[in-house]
Amino acid sequence: MRKEENPEEHIYRLFNDALKRYSLIEDGDRILIALSGGKDSMTLLRLMARRVRIFKPRFEFEAAFVKMRNIPYQCDEDYLRDFAESLGVRLHVFETSFDESTDERHTHCFLCSWNRRKMLFAAAKELKCNKIALGHNKDDIMETALMNLTFQGRFSTMKPMMKMERFPMTLIRPLCLIREHNVLAFAEAEGFRKQLKNCPYEDASHRYNMKEIVARLDEMNPEFNYSIFRAMGL
């Protein structure tokens, strides 16, 4: 962070760097923001609401919250709706669920994420959006790369932008250059309220363990986050 920057200006600069580097937003885009109630998605919505006021590129966006009925993860919907409305954004709420007994090969986290993503695609189509913006930060991308390397034997990760092959939809990750601790500092400065109840499976996930490994690698080499992005061609 530059000495003269506060938390918002720092992440807003990196946010704009990502938009430019990866051409994430174009004139005429209609974007659906995936709002989960976590610090990342709320930060994303806040930054998008600031960016949309700039003349170029011209785009529109709305927000969607997906409730997973069979996961005891709670979020204050009224708070999210008020937060979105304070930024001039309409929040749409959708519900879905999954039957874990039909697929014992995958974890709760995979099934939840997959079904939540399917609902987001359906919501984007219903709302006539051509892009979905997700709140994955730089740490999420590094952790995914290490998980894929460790458990699948391939060095790949979530891309800042991914165009779907089967239908006209593009996923974008505008927080891809922002470290998690910077998002946390911004969320605390803004007073974002935490969700009522965290997912009961999050501490048991591979991602939770990878967070510790990324922290160790940061200690070994403070430039690690730049090195791994260069290695992935990002």
Image (tube, rainbow, N blue to C red):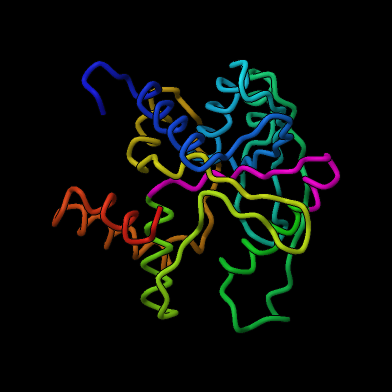
On whether residue 129 falls in the magenta region, the answer is: yes
Q: Is residue 212 left or right of residue 132?
A: left
Q: Is residue 2 magenta?
A: no
Viewed as shown, does residue 110 lie left or right of 147? right
* Position of residue 48 measured from the top left corner of the image (x, y, whole percent): 58, 28
Q: Quadrant of the N terminus?
A: top left
Q: Residue at x 63, y 50 (%)?
A: 171
Span colored in magenta:
122-138
**Residue at horizontal 30%, vertical 58%?**
228
Count of picture labels: 0
Residue at point 72%, 28% (across, down):
60
The residue that appears at 46% across and 39% down in the rendered structure is: 21
Q: Is residue 38 left or right of residue 78?
A: left
Corner quadrant of residue 231 = bottom left
Q: Nearer the viewer, residue 71 or 13?
A: 13
In the rendering, at what x and y percent does residue 103 appear?
68, 81
Q: Residue furthest left?
A: 220
Residue 202, image x, y percentages: 47, 60
8 shown above or below 196: above
Q: Nearer the viewer, residue 200 or 206?
A: 206
